Image (cartoon, rainbow, N blue to C red):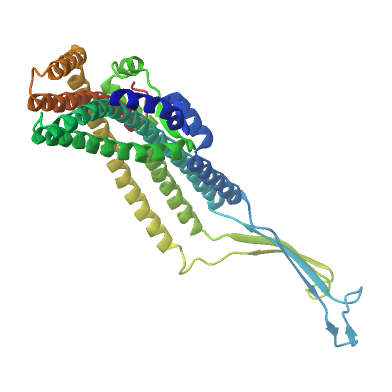
């Protein structure tokens, strides 16, 4: 009777619980991610900013024009005597960059644009990895909760009947307590899982720009087949990832940009030429005199030595960082490959009949317990073992799938 009432309650509650929930496949989540993610939209502005700096680097200084007019003519006592017999002068000058410094500045700005683009790709890659791990963590943990919920409902019903029988003196109180302890343990496990799921759903919602509770939809046969056979051999993963991994390529571009920055700083040690033309009506050696003007700093004590030395330090530092990042990437791929093999071999070594065997034994135990053929202690021990086995089998598969996602992420290749 109690079980029947509980079933009716769940049926009535189901439409309410489903409000605010949406079922998504991994592909649908990735589509929403590309469309809605605010971090991606914000990061794109950094590329636009770098391109704007690149445009600015190409612009030369504006020409400089100056003029001179007579204010007071002391000879004839005229004010602003700028007419035919007065005095006025004009000059126009342009700064001309020498040593190729303007092109080197442009090259450095272009390198920064390439770095901003790679950093954008890296952000997309990181968020996509987080999306995938959250998605499959939620899916497999929700499967665990379904197993626990089934057990909790079953045991709650059993507990209610035991309480009635205990009150009548037909069953010892210790058996009721034993059953209550088992139920509390299962509910504690469920609460812990639910907490993790809520946190991961929050992360996933932020990534894909959704507010509803995500219910992952997974075809387990398809996902298992996907992560079974690598598309790329292990030996070629490292060499290909050195050309594809945006985090490593960012360090490559940073190293290149520091080389360009050093060249730019060296070119700044070359003085720039200021050249122009001037006109002087009456103040020069001749009337209406037109002159060519030029000027150049004398490179005595300021040869940009400090900035050049700092740039050399940055070049050496970036070279060390690049070597470290290369070694780190190779080790990450090696580790990810070993981890995937470990998880795959561990999962594939499990006889898939264990699922049906567990269910068969479970049904038999339930039937025998209801007939009082086994004790409560034997029953609760089996339930604990049954739940642990189910959890572990589910966890083995989850870790195997996540290890494949990790290998794809580290290499930035479609290994699976």
| Residue in front for this viewpoint, 416 or 383 | 383
Q: Is 152 placed above or below 319 here?
A: above
The N terminus: image quadrant: top left
| Residue in front for this viewpoint, 11 or 173 | 173
Answer with left or right where residue 48 lies relative to residue 79: left
Give the residue displayed 13% in from the left and 32% down from the top.
166
| Residue in front for this viewpoint, 389 or 73 | 389
The C terminus: image quadrant: top left
Answer with left or right where residue 124 lies relative to residue 51: left
Residue 372 location in percent, x, y? 10, 19
Q: Quadrant of residue 279?
A: bottom right
Give the residue displayed 36% in from the left and 50% down from the top.
315
User: Can the viewer see residue 14?
Assistant: yes
| Residue in front for this viewpoint, 214 or 153 | 153
User: Can the viewer see residue 350?
Assistant: no
Q: Quadrant of residue 197?
A: top left
Q: Quadrant of residue 254?
A: top left
Answer with left or right where residue 213 lies relative to residue 346: right
Give the residue displayed 45% in from the left and 32% down from the top.
16
Residue 381 location in percent, x, y? 10, 27
Residue 67 location in percent, x, y? 77, 70
Q: Is 202 placed above or below 82 here?
A: above
Residue 130 location in percent, x, y? 37, 36
What is the count of numbered marks?
Answer: 0
Residue that lies at the very extreme toward the front in this rendered image: 168
């Amino acid at each position: 009777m109690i079980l029947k009432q509980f079933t009716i309650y769940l049926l009535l509650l189901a439409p309410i619980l489903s409000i605010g929930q949406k079922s998504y496949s991994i592909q649908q989540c990735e589509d929403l991610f590309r469309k809605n993610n605010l971090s991606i939209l914000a990061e794109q502005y950094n590329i636009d900013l770098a391109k704007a700096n690149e445009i600015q680097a190409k612009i030369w200084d504006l020409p400089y024009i100056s003029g001179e007019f007579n204010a007071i003519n002391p000879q004839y006592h005229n004010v602003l005597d700028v007419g035919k017999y007065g005095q006025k002068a004009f000059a126009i000058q342009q700064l001309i960059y020498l040593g190729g410094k303007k092109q080197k500045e442009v090259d450095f700005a272009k390198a920064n644009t390439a770095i901003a683009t790679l950093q954008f790709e890296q952000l997309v890659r990181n968020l996509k990895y987080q999306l995938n791990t959250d998605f499959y963590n939620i899916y497999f943990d929700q499967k665990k909760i379904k197993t626990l919920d089934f057990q909790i409902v079953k045991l709650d019903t059993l507990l209610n009947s035991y309480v009635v029988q205990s009150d009548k003196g037909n069953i010892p109180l210790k058996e009721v307590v034993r059953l209550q302890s088992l139920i509390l343990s299962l509910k504690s496990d469920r609460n812990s899982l639910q907490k993790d799921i809520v946190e991961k759903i929050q992360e996933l919602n932020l990534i894909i720009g959704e507010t509803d509770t995500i219910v992952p939809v997974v075809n387990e046969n398809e996902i298992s087949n996907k992560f079974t056979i690598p598309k790329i051999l292990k030996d070629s993963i490292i060499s290909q990832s050195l050309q594809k991994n945006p985090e490593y390529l960012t360090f490559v571009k940073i190293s290149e940009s520091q080389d360009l920055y050093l060249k730019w700083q060296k070119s700044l040690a070359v003085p720039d030429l200021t050249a122009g033309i001037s006109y002087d009506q009456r103040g020069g050696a001749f009337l209406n005199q037109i002159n060519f003007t030029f000027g150049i700093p004398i490179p005595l004590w300021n040869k940009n030595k400090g900035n050049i030395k700092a740039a050399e330090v940055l070049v050496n530092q970036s070279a060390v960082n690049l070597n470290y990042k290369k070694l780190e990437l190779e080790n990450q791929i090696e580790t990810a490959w070993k981890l995937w093999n470990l998880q795959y071999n561990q999962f594939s070594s499990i006889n898939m009949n264990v699922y049906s065997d567990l269910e068969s034994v479970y049904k038999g135990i339930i039937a025998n317990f209801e007939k009082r053929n086994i004790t409560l202690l034997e029953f609760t021990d089996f339930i604990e073992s049954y739940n642990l086995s189910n959890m572990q089998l589910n966890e083995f598969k989850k870790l195997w799938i996540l290890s494949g996602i990790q290998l794809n992420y580290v290499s930035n290749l479609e290994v699976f």
